[in-house]
Image (cartoon, rainbow, N blue to C red):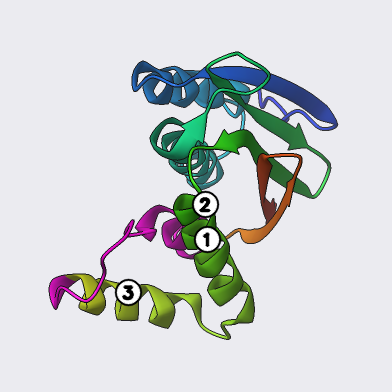
Amino acid sequence: MTVEPPTNLSRRIEIPLVWDSVGKIRLETGMLFSSFDAPVRDAAIMVASELTENIVKYGAPLDGEAVGFVSFEIQDDQFSITSHNAVSSDNNLDAVQTILEQIADSSDPRELSLSRLRELIEGKVTGPSQLGLLRVATDGGCALNHSYADTVLTIVAERKLG
């Protein structure tokens, strides 16, 4: 008997700003995507993990609470995983926005990723590596979008199914 993956599913998970949140989101994502083929499930777990790591590393309390959020939307032909969090510093915000704009402007995110790795090896990077967001675009096969308003950074990773 074959189980069909869920469609039109929506879920939002609170992410405390602690490292244990990464393990929690991996388990939650694995359960949400349990009926999908392994490549889709593994990509979703990786994407949710990378976005959660960013929340934990760079997040700040939101409305007085030390949390961010990860939201999932599964539709007939795609899924999206979205992170929402306040940002701890303007430098972190600038770094995230810069790499997201580079990914959006790139015709080849894999080459951008390799270039970033070379810069890291050569000691040319002084801030965050931002390899996680590059991995979301390359290994996760996701299109990335972002917005920033009222101190909240929102990053949306979308991937077509099939």
Whether residue 7 is visible, yes or no, is yes
The structure residue drawn at horizontal position 31% and vertical position 60%, both measured from the top left corner, is: 127
Q: Which residues are magenta?
A: 121-140
Farthest residue toward the left?
122
Q: Secondary structure at mark 3?
A: helix
The structure residue drawn at horizontal position 45% and vertical position 41%, both measured from the top left corner, is: 54
Above or below — where is 31 with respect to 80?
A: above
Q: Is residue 142 magenta?
A: no
Name the image quarter holding residue 128.
Answer: bottom left
Q: Nearer the viewer, mark 1 or mark 2?
A: 2
Q: Which residue is mark 3?
A: 116
The structure residue drawn at horizontal position 54% and vertical position 76%, both measured from the top left corner, is: 102
In percent of width and height, residue 55 lies at 49, 34
In percent of width and height, residue 148 lies at 71, 50
In depth, the one of 144 and 34 nearer the eye is 144
Measure the alpha-carbon separation of dots 1 and 2.
6 Å
Tag shown at residue 90:
2
Name the image quarter holding residue 112.
Answer: bottom left
In percent of width and height, residue 42 lies at 46, 41
Q: Earlier in the sequence, mark 3 or mark 1?
A: 1
Above or below — where is 90 with respect to 21?
A: below
